[in-house]
Image (cartoon, rainbow, N blue to C red):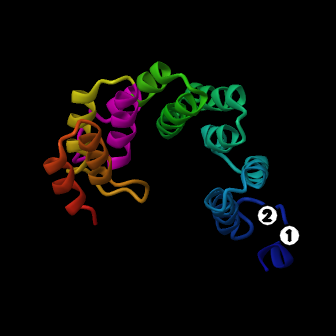
Amino acid sequence: LFTNRYGSHPMMGGTPWRWHAQMLRQMAFIEADMEHYEEQLRWIEAYNELYRPEMLAESAWPLMKLRRFDDARTAADIGRRSGAPWQNEVALNALCAVEFEAGDERASYDACRAALMLHGADPERQSAVDFTNFAEAARSLFFLDEAEEMGLLATRAEVSWYGNPYVELGELYLREARFAEALAMLREVH
C-alpha cells in the first residue's frame, strides 16, 4: 500500500519516508524470525540502498545461518569499523554466535566477553542474553565457575526474548551432578 501511494524509492523529506525505512527494517527482522535468511539479506540490501545509517553488522547473523562464516565475519568487521557504537555492539554479538557456530570456541569466548564488557558486565544495563551467551561460551571451554557466575548475573539482568538464564543454570548444574540446585533453577523458569 505504501509503495502504491509513494513509490518504492521515497525521497527523504518529501514523503513519509521514515515509515518506509521502518517497514524495510521490520521486514528484515520478520524474515529472520521465519528463518528465511536469503530474504532477510535482500531486505537489508533494499534498506541500505535508500537509507542511512546502513544496516551493516546486521548481515552477519543471516550469513552465519547460511553457513557463510567468512562473509559473516566480514559483515561484522565492516560494522565494527563503521565507528557507530550500535554497529560495534551488533557486530560483537554476531561474532560471538558466528565463531560458536563455526566451531571456534575460543574465538567465540573472546567475542562474547568483548560484547559483555561493552557495558561493563552490568546486569542493570544489559540484557540477560549478553550474560547467557558468554556463559555458554565459557561452558564450551569448561570454565564452569565462570559460566555459573555469568548465569547468576543473567538472572538479575533485563529479561531477553531469547533464552532463559534459569534453564541455562539448570543445564549447567545437571552436567555437574548438582541435582538439587538444578531443580531449584528449573523451578524459577518463567
Q: Nearer the viewer, residue 182 or 68?
A: 182
Q: State the image quarter where residue 123 is shown.
A: top left
Q: State the image quarter where residue 111 is shown.
A: top left
**Is there any visible trace of residue 42 in the rendered image?**
yes
Relative to 33, 15 lies left or right = right
Provide the residue span drawn in magenta.
Answer: 113-140
Q: Is residue 182 magenta?
A: no
Q: Residue at x 55, y 28 (%)?
A: 99
Question: What type of secondary structure mainly makes up the magenta span?
Answer: helix
Residue 40 position, x and y percent, is 72, 53
Q: Nearer the viewer, residue 97 or 18?
A: 97
Q: State the image quarter where residue 148 is shown.
A: top left
Q: Amino acid at mark 2?
A: Pro
Relative to 25, 121 lies left or right = left
Q: Is residue 121 magenta?
A: yes
Residue picked out by circle 1:
7
Secondary structure of residue under mark 2: loop
Residue 85 position, x and y percent, is 47, 35
Q: Residues within 10 Å of mark 1 (few under 14, many from 20)?
A: few
**In the depicted structure, whether residue 92 falls above or below residue 132:** above
Residue 21 position, x and y percent, is 68, 60
Residue picked out by circle 2:
10
Q: Residue at x 33, y 30 (%)?
A: 117
Q: Residues within 10 Å of mark 2 (few under 14, many from 20)?
A: some
Q: Are marks 1 and 2 in contact (CB under 8 Å)?
A: yes
Q: Residue at x 62, y 42 (%)?
A: 61
Q: State which quarter of the image contains the C terminus.
A: bottom left
